[in-house]
Amino acid sequence: EVVLVGGSTRIPKVQAVVRELFGREPHKGVNPDEVVSVGAAVQAGVLGGEVKDVLLLDVTPLSLGIETLGGVNTTLIPRNTTIPTRKSEIFSTAADSQTSVEVHVLQGERPMARDNRTLGKFHLVG
């Protein structure tokens, strides 16, 4: 069963695309306020072995990135990526002989770091 909940899933074109893609009518009867608890209950059933033939995918709802030179948000993990995931990328320091760097971890879609949500900061020294 394909379940649509909240936001843009109410748009008729989105519903039509889902209908075409999966060849069945999407279920729209889930209360958006209850969807998290329903998903948790289904996942508990899957983990407990009581529910079979169900695949729930967790995704990161917004892109994850770090702030780079000039205050730019450099996306490492795009939104809607299934989790857990892994990403590796090489960055260089801003100055020669630099012995430490602060890593500013961000969540959001905006190109400038200041316009996104800070998830945390940490220092790499060495």
Image (cartoon, rainbow, N blue to C red):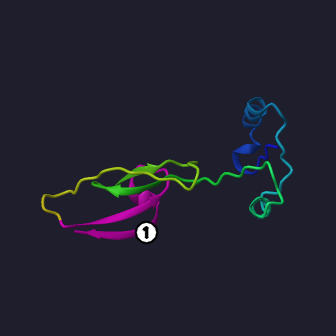
Q: Residue furthest front?
A: 49
Q: Is residue 126 left or right of residue 66?
A: left
Q: Is residue 18 left or right of residue 82?
A: right
Majority secondary structure of magenta residues:
strand
Nearest the eye: 71 or 85: 85
| Residue lying furthest left | 97
Residue at (77, 50) in percent of width and height: 54
The image position of residue 105, as x and y in percent, is: 41, 62
69 above or below 4?
Answer: below
Q: Is residue 124 magenta?
A: yes
The quadrant the N terminus occupies is top right
Tag 1 residue: 120
At x 20%, y 56%, the residue is: 94
Magenta stretch in the rendered image: 99-126
Say which residue appears at 17% left-offset and 63% top-offset: 98
Q: Quadrant of the C terminus?
A: bottom left
> In this image, 31 relative to 58: left or right?
right
Residue at image position (18%, 67%) is 99
User: Is 9 colored magenta in this rendering?
Assistant: no
Mark 1 nearby-residue class (10 Å; few <14, some 14–19, many ≥20): few
Residue type at mark 1 is Gly
